[in-house]
Every structure is written in C-alpha cells, then in structure tokens.
Amino acid sequence: MKSVGFSLRDYQKDVIKRVSEAWRSHKSVMVQMPTGTGKTHVLASVVRECISCDKGTVWIVAHRRELVSQIKDTVAKYGISTESSDVNVLSIQWLSRHWDDIQTIPGMIIIDEAHHALADTYMELWRRYPETKKLGMTATPCRMNRRGFTDLFELLITSWSISEFIVKGQLSLFDYVSIYSDSEEQRLIDSLEKRGADGDYQVKEMNTVLNRRQSIERLYMSLDKYARGKKGIVYAISIAHARHIASYYSEHDISAVAIDSKTPVAERKRLVEDFRNGNVNVLVNVDIFSEGFDCPDVEFVQMARPTLSLAKYLQQVGRGLRKVKGKESCMIIDNVGLYRIFGLPTSAWNWNAMFRGDIAGKGAHFSRIKNISGLSKHQMDTIDPDIGVGMVISHERLQAQLTDAAQSEPTVLLKAWQDKDSGLWGVKNGNEKITDAVFLSVSDIGYDMAAVSMPNGKCGLVDLAGNVIWKKKNCRSMKFIKDCFLVADLQRGNRIYVDLHSLRTYDTKPEIKRYGSIELLKVGSLYYSRTKKVYITGLNIDSFRIPHRNFYLTLFDINVPSGCMDGEILQEDGKTGYACLLAGDYDSFYWMYRVLEDESIIVRDDCGRYYHVEEGQEKRFIGCNNAGGCLDEINRLSKKAERSARNLKAEEKRRRQKFLNGIHDAVPFKSGDKWGLKVGNRVIVPPVYRNMLPPVGKYCAVEKYYSQWGIIALDGKVVIEPQYTEIDIKENGTALITFVTGKKKQVRLQ
C-alpha cells in the first residue's frame, strides 16, 4: 500500500478516537456524520489503521454497484489500493450471490450508507461473521417504519449537527425558498393519498399528479428566478418526470440532462464528467445522486419530488452543502413543500432516538400539520404569485441566527454534587464525578465549565475534565454571561470580566468586534485576540488596518518578528507587516508570511513553525525556520497556487462568456428613478444607474451620475468606469469616449 498523507480535521479525529474506544467493549458501531463532512476521511483512516496493525482483510460494502467504483476511486486518493487482498470494496448484491465462494473471514466490515443495513441481505453479514468488527457509516440513522438499528449495531456515535458544521465553516450556508401553503403545487401534494411499500408517497400517483406541463413550468420559473446560470441538481419523481424536466429546461436555454437507472453506465459517467467540468449546468435525476455523489461546487438543489422520508430529504439537500472555494452559499429550491414537513436542514434531530427506533424518520402528511406548522405566504420575505414560491430564509439571516444560537449558553453537562459528611461540593459530568468534594460552593455552570469557591479563599473555573483552569483571590460571586464571558465580583467591590476563550482578565467589559466568525475584544484603544496565546495591538490602530479576508483576519503591526516578512506583504517602513487570526483557531495568533495566488496563505507562529492555510481547511504544518525543505515546500505551494489561480480565472472567463452568449434581447427598464437591464421578466442588471442606453452587442452605456457615462457588459461588470461626458459603442466591439475637455478617444472593449 502506497503511503499517502492526508489531514484529518479535529472532529474527524474525535470520531475515530471514539470508534477506537467503543471497539474495546463493542463489536459493531454506527457513526453518524452529516453529508459533506468527510465520512470517507474517517473510513480511510480506519482502514489504514486496520491494515497497518495487520488485523486482517477489510471489506467495504455498498448497497449499489455504482457506489463501489466511487468508493474505490475515493479511497485510492488516500493511498489505499483495492487491487490487493487487504481491502475489498463489494456491493451487497455481489456478496449475496457469492457467499459460498468466499473462503476468508474479514477482520473488519465497513458498511457505507448503513441506514440500508436492515435489509436481509445485510443481516447475512452478522450471521456469517458474528465475531468480525463492523463499522456502519451514515448521515441519517433512521427508518420511516421506526425500525431501529440496535439488532445490528450496539452503539451510535454522532458528530456535530449541521448547524454546528455551518457555524464552524465546514458546511455551506444556504438560501431556502419554498412553495407557500396556498399555492397550486401544495394543494396537489396535499391530495396525494396512496403510499408505497416503504411508507412514502406512491411514485405512480405522484407522477400522475405532478408530471404535468404546468408543474414543470413552475419548476422552471423557480429555477429561472433563483438559480439561473448556477450549477445544480434536480430531484425528480420518475424517469419520465426527469426527462420531461430536462427537456423543458433545455428548450429554455438551460443546459440540462436527465440521468436515471436506465442511463447506460458509460453515458452516465460522461454526463457526470460534463457536469463536473461545467459543460452541463443541471443534472436531473431519479434517486441517483441522493447518496455517494461528491461534487462540492453544486450551487443549487431543486426538489421536485415530494417525500415523507427524513433520510431522503437530508441526503438530497446535503449535496448542496459541501464547501468549496468561492462558493458563498447554496440555493435550495423546495418546489414540493418539504420545509413544512421537516423544517430547515439545520433543525435538530434526535439521532439516538431514531437509532433505537423510538422515533420514525418520517414526516407527517401535509393536511394534518399545515394548520399547526404550515408556512403561510405571510411568513415569507418575498412571494412570487405566479409560481407560488417565496424566500423562507436567506443565507445572511441564517448566518445571523446560527451565530446567535452558537453564542447562547449551551446545554449544561456539568452539575454540582455534595458530600453529606463534609458538606463540601464537587462537580459531575453527567453521572460521573470529575472532582472530589473539595469546594465550598459551585456558584454557576455554563459553557462546559463550573465556577467554584475554594476553602483557601480563591475562586476558580473547572473544565469538563475536572481540571481547575483559572484561579482568582477574594471573589464574592461569579456568573457566566453571554458572549463567552465570566463576570466576577471581588470582595473589595471591583468587578472583573474573564474571556473564557483566552482566560484573560479585564477590569472593564471588553467591546466585541466581529469580523465574520472571528472576534476581537476592544478595551480602550487596544484590540485583543480571543486566543489562548493573546495578541495585543499597538496603540490607536485604525479599523482599516484590520482587513477581514473571510477565513482569516490581518492586523497591521510595526514590529513583525524577523522571518515573517515577504515581498508580497505590504511594508511601509522598517519591520512592518501583519499579525493574523484564523477562523475557528482559538489556540494562537500567527504572523502573515505570504498570500498565494489562489488566496490561500502561509503563516508563521512565534516558535518559527510555518503553516499553509486554505479556506474551509485546517492549517497544515510545512516546516520550521532553517529546516531543510521548508522554503522548497513554500515555493512549491506558490507555483501550485499560481497554476490553480490561472485555471480558475480561465474557467470563470469561460463561464462568463457562456453566460453572456446566452443573453439575447436585453432591454433597459426603469424602476423608480433608476435604470437596469432585463431579458423578458428576468432582471440581469439591477436598477442602479441614472440612465442607460440600449445594448450594442454585449455592452451597454450607462450614466452613474449626471453627465458621467461608462460602459458595462450585459452581466453588469463595469468595463469602463463612468467618468466621460459621452459614450458611443460600435458594433465592431470598440467605443468612442468623450472626455470632459472634449477630447475623443477610440478604445477596444474586448
């Protein structure tokens, strides 16, 4: 097996650690991780550990033949060969036909998409190999019939919720639009009465009711309004429905193809590759891309198939939540009212109860719940009466809500307990005593910490492991407050504030300055980082010296250590440069070394360790000062970033050109006292200009302020800044511009 390194994120390491601990007392474990959070990283790490420890052959079992080749390709990226006898990737269908041909007993069996494991074909794995360790991987450990998994798996290990992954920058934000309760589409769905064998809506009835031209027209109008020009996946009811949707979209200048179980394997592979490369914008499918499909730059998901299955809902929307550079958010277009059954994808799910079978992974029928939790049109931000669709939540509002929820006090795991003999108090984590009874009192509990008073007159903070992580003399009272602070009143009447991220104490409550997910504390004229190793700015630093770059924040500093400056970093005089804070990193601050062409960065800590940081990824260690190969690796990353940036620019240019070529018959329109551009009813440039002339070719003359004319392309990109008294665009792609002085100049626009 070729050794290939890959970086695991902290939550993946945590899952692997918990799996290893669980196997000490359990033979079969199920792991739940949301779609798009790297289950394959966990799977690959477990496989490599098993192989390296010579624990026998590993089987990876999938429920569809198509997933077998996908898993082989994916694990190969981590240096795991499926050509040897060490690792076998098998479909359960193949196994069910070849049980008697298999002579070896596997050392471990990993079941991909393990929510399918209740099928009798999977049960044979337990009957034939009762002593073999088994690991089930799924995003949705639930069944519609409320049948639990405890007959197969002894324990469920869950990762963070979708909300937590979004807040921590590991999954994408999303905009969510849905049909309202009085829409024609909702009335049609409410009329569905028949159920299939699995308890979901019957496909035949859905197809009869919704596979109609009027419904498909509304699907198109929704996509045209909310996702025109974006890359995405549509989930259809049936093969006929998928083909009708793809055909209608194609007739209306949307590059769409239908893929279903009858699509030949070679043809399907070609179409998927075209989609990945941007030659096809929309994949319309029937249960093909609900599981195991990895294409992070999906920009929208359109749901055209009603379902009562929570697993289907989350698997489908999850295809759009993967993070990728340059993707701000995903548009979820819910044309079948699934929001009203399940809520947003960020809703809280009781996976342990579903794993046990206490709760079904099934939604209620619309007509029975719409009066209780129905989404009325008055609850939406905007409504389009022609298609009956409105915005449920924008990604900006979602981010604000999730951030507020994350900053509120979390569920308390700690609690106080008292020793009756001594009268002293201790702290429990659940039912486990993590400290002895050694405290006079436990003043407050919050943020996974306990505020305690000690017999020696000191007060302190106890963490989840029972360690005293902070102490202070002469406290009269302590209380946790919002924004992750502890406030303590001292006996002499003073009050102090403790930042629970850094454990630094402040005499006045700091002002919080937020830059995306990164926070600074301002006290007087100084800024402090909320990291364990605290960075403090110099006096009177201006706010414009603290630029935010999405996944990192830089702070101008006149005393950058030697070795932290590079030609690409702004240096005004002397040893100047930038300190740097990374999103999600509460351990330390860093010194900026280099910004690469692909917008990733190289940073250095105070110990001389260099790291490469990309958006949405954990920092990766490169090397140390004067260490062999460190500079070579930085130069290699720089060249790689240059190639990546060139390719991205070329791709963006190709996509933009394709979009421009698809614009026909654009005309100016006026809204209020401002002008914009539209094609039919579709706005392509919002009304922001004082005046606008009809387009010539791919360009349009616009007046921003009185007698200040410029040129924009038909996608709104400014080609010539508005500052000229007159503009005359020619058919040959040139323009004659007139300066304020009356001087004229011919310019080429392409």
Image (cartoon, helix red, strand yellow):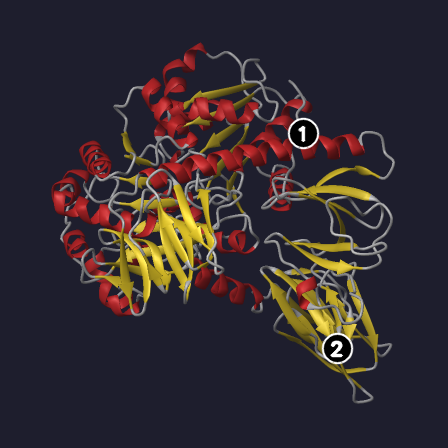
Could you tell which of marks 1 and 2 lies nearer the N-terminus?
1
Residue 27 is at least partly visible in this image: no
Which label is found at residue 5? 1
Q: Amino acid at mark 1?
A: Gly
Name the side, left or right, on which 143 lies relative to 744. Answer: left
Q: Does 582 appear above or below 37?
A: below
Q: Amino acid at mark 2?
A: Gly
Name the side, left or right, on which 424 lies relative to 196. Answer: right
Secondary structure, mark 2, is loop
Callout in the foreground (1, 2): 2
Q: CA distance from mark 1 to mark 2?
A: 46 Å
Q: Does 705 appear above or below 17?
A: below
User: Neighbour class for label 1 at 10 Å: few (<14), some, many (≥20)?
Assistant: few
The percent coordinates of residue 258 (x first, y second) are: 27, 31
Which label is found at residue 399? none
Residue 427 is at least partly visible in this image: yes
User: Neighbour class for label 2 at 10 Å: few (<14), some, many (≥20)?
Assistant: few
The percent coordinates of residue 145 (x first, y second) are: 31, 45
The percent coordinates of residue 487 (x first, y second) are: 71, 78
Q: Which residue is mark 2?
A: 524
Q: Quadrant of the N terminus?
A: top right
